[in-house]
Amino acid sequence: MFSRRHPYLFFLLVFSAIIAGSAVCLSMLRLVSQDQSEIGFGEKVGVIELSGVITDSKRILEQIKDFRENDSVKSIIIRIDSPGGAVGPSQEIYREIRKTIEKKKVIASLATIAASGGYYIAAAADGIIANPGTITGSIGVILGYTNFEALFEKIGLNPVVIKSGKYKDIGSPVRKMTEAERELLQEFSDNVHTQFIEDVAQGRKIPSTQVRGIADGRIFSGEQAKALGLIDRLGNFEDAIEWAGRMGGIKGEISIVYPPEEKLPFIKYLMEMSAAQIRQLVVQMGESMVTGGYIYRPDPLP
């Protein structure tokens, strides 16, 4: 027999088969559990969570689109807990919400903080609800950097820059900013600020002059924001679910659904098996005894 002639090779083959089989079982169990959590009937409110600094919009855009095209999802909640972030991704999400409200109701639920880009996104929704103490607002744009020129001079470093355009190294940290550069950056900042103001005005359906009057970068509590017309209601996440459900026409108990977790391809999942799982398998295999060319296992794998 092969196992008698090549006991160690046979051991390795069996060991590899056990690892592969275990990975397959774990993967199938994971997929089944996910699928069961996604299966459901009836009308629901879709909940999309946006948290942390906004640097990329791809995942949120996909989730919004999926819920918009899902007939069982009658309305959507964007749950925001973010201090803001990059302008581009914030504008992309804002636009996707504006496209979505033409088909379904969207409610923005503000958690601990929804400021700057976080509020930018919220302004696109049909309605905004926040806690009385939620930090929001901060309608403004900021550009900044640290100048290391004096430090470099002190330690004897002399930066050399070769550029093809007058403003190519604008904002360089190794030299002073010129007045022309400052004016250029101020113009850029003012332009983006105006875009922010106009989008908030459009989303909130209030005059841009009214928004501009409070768009100086200051933050507001949820209570202050409501008095200023920046949000519609004070309440928690459960209140947001109730509001979104009724706006979506759901009667009776309201169920919510979250976007499915990204499912890893099997090979990637196998590669990402934890070291603890593999160590456990190695220990279990080590408990086997090789006797007379045969592999004998006193107890089966659990």
Image: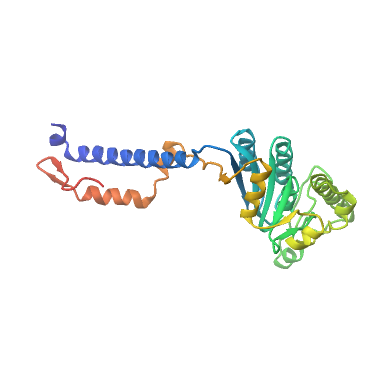
> Left or right of 160: which side holds 300?
left
> Left or right of 240: which side holds 277?
left
Number of numbered discs? 0
Q: Nearer the viewer, residue 153 or 86?
A: 86
Image position, residue 27 (x, y; %)? 39, 40
**Whether residue 272 can be seen here:** yes
Q: Nearer the viewer, residue 48 or 160?
A: 48
Vertical comparison of 136 with 302: above or below: below
Say which quarter of the image contains residue 177: bottom right
> Left or right of 283: which side holds 223?
right
Q: Quadrant of the N terminus?
A: top left
Instruction: Name the outermost residue toward the bottom.
Output: 154
Instruction: Name the outermost residue toward the front.
Output: 252
Image position, residue 227 (x, y; %)? 80, 60
Image position, residue 118 (x, y; %)? 71, 52
> Left or right of 186: which side holds 128?
left
Q: Nearer the viewer, residue 156 or 82?
A: 82
Instruction: Name the outermost residue toward the top.
Output: 1
Colouring: rainbow
Which residue is found at the position 73% from the left and 55% from the top?
233
Image position, residue 246 (x, y; %)? 66, 45
Say which quarter of the image contains residue 99: top right
Which residue is found at the position 62% from the left and 41% from the top?
250
